[in-house]
Image: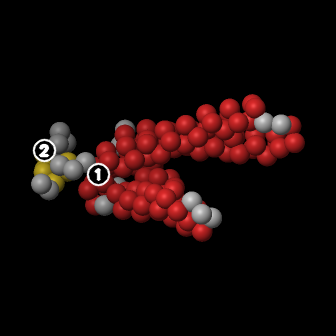
Amino acid sequence: MGASATPAVDGQVATRTAIGTLRIAGWLVFGECAVLATILIYLVYADATRDNASTRSAVLVTVYAAIFVLALGLIARGLRNRRPWSRGPAIALHLMFVPLGWYMIVGGLVAVGIVMILLGIGGFVLLLLPSTRAELEVR
């Protein structure tokens, strides 16, 4: 099952993939957003029940996580709506997963680190595939 050409309204040929790599990439980013949102809920709970000695740094980590949840949500929505601007930030995000995963492995969280590295490489490859670029109409 490869790409199939369908006639477009303006006379150009639009390419649609049978696999839907853009759809898979969008769901991957959405899943990452959902996991981070779950972690954010835990962080808010932990901040609310924490002693005052470490409140400032805990709140900063929570705010940082909230910003990433928002960014991931916007990127996932952009990919779902086939917005070309969303591809660049999604690629950068997945490139950041690889070193973070490595440091998690070194820090003793081997399973989490391996998953992060696989997500990073998988998302990166999905977003670079010619079929994804065609779906986003990126040259």
Q: Quadrant of the N terminus?
A: bottom left
At horizontal 47% and vertical 53% (from top left) the residue drawn is 90
The dot on residue 7 is 2
At horizontal 87% and vertical 42% (from top left) the residue drawn is 53
Front residue of this view, candidates 115 and 65: 115
At horizontal 43% and vertical 42% (from top left) the residue drawn is 31
Front residue of this view, candidates 77 and 66: 66
Q: Is residue 124 left or right of residue 47?
A: left
Q: In the rendering, at what x and y percent does residue 4 appear? A: 13, 51
How many numbered badges does the structure rendering display? Answer: 2
Which image quarter: residue 59? top right
Q: On the image, numbered disc 1 is attached to which residue?
A: 21
Q: Give amino acid for label 1.
A: Thr
Give the secondary structure at mark 1: helix
Dot 2 or dot 1: first in sequence order is: 2
Q: In the rendering, at what x and y percent does residue 72 appear? A: 51, 44
Which image quarter: residue 48? top right
Q: Is residue 46 above or below residue 18?
A: above
- Tell me the distance, in whole angstroms, between the alpha carbons under discs 2 and 1: 20 Å
Q: Is residue 117 above or below residue 71?
A: below
Residue count near mark 1 (Cα–Cα under 10 Å), binned few <14, some 14–19, many ≥20: many
Q: In the rendering, at what x and y percent does residue 2 appear? A: 14, 56
Q: In the rendering, at what x and y percent does residue 79 appear? A: 39, 44
Q: Which dot, 2 or 1, sits closer to the camera?
A: 1
The dot on residue 50 is none
Give the secondary structure at mark 2: strand
Q: Give amino acid for label 2.
A: Pro
